Amino acid sequence: MLAATGIVLLTVTACGQRPESVPAAGGGATTPTSSSAAAPTRPGNPQTFPAGLLVVPPGQLDTSALASDYPREVFVTADGKTVYLRAEEGGCGKATVEVREETSSQVALNLIETKSSIKGQMCTMDIRYPVVSVPLSEPLGQRKLVLSSEKRGG
């Protein structure tokens, strides 16, 4: 009985574990860019990055507004006009990204988890890390990329 309880506890606690690293698809690095003009999109497989992206260098990212355990995988297309990011969602939530501000010196993106507002809806207790993207009006170039996150709805 004690062993069975231990196994159940181990299984339940493992469900909420965040992976240390999720490799990018295609083996290449990517760099994110975003634009407020177009709606956020998701690649075909919501867990992998498209091939051919470039990594946004850590020195170009300001992630100080993100929780310490929030994913920080950020990529941009070769032309610099679309940013791809790893987001976080759980249960009945859906992750998206929007451009808060785009200036000549920085681009501020907000990662959003929108929770369902359906009364009585049963939601799983899982955490997912989908890839989301957003187009920019101009290429990211050397501009600083500032990331924040929020939860909406529910």
Image (spheres, grey):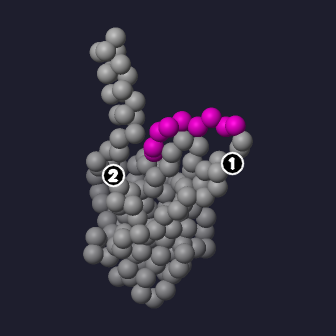
Query: In the picture, which quadrant includes the N terminus?
Result: top left
Q: Secondary structure at mark 1?
A: loop
Nearer to us in this view, 67 or 26? 67
For residue 117, which numbered disc appears in the image? 1
Residue 33 in the image: above or below residue 141: above
Residue 66 in the image: above or below residue 102: above
Q: Residue at x 41, y 69 (%)?
A: 65
User: Magenta part of the protein: which range?
Assistant: 120-128
Residue picked out by circle 2: 24
Q: Secondary structure at mark 2?
A: loop
For residue 4, which numbered disc appears in the image? none
Q: Position of residue 102 (x, y in %)?
A: 51, 81
Q: Residue at x 70, y 37 (%)?
A: 120
Q: Residue furthest front?
A: 2
Q: Are marks 1 and 2 in contact (CB under 8 Å)?
A: no
Q: Residue at x 29, y 57 (%)?
A: 28
Amino acid identity at mark 2: Ala
Cα separation between marks 1 and 2: 32 Å
Residue 73 visible, this angle: no
Nearer to us in this view, 42 or 116? 116
Residue 40 in the image: above or below residue 43: below
Q: Position of residue 117 (x, y in %)?
A: 69, 48
Amino acid identity at mark 1: Ser
Q: Earlier in the sequence, mark 1 or mark 2?
A: 2
Q: Residues within 10 Å of mark 2 (few under 14, many from 20)?
A: some
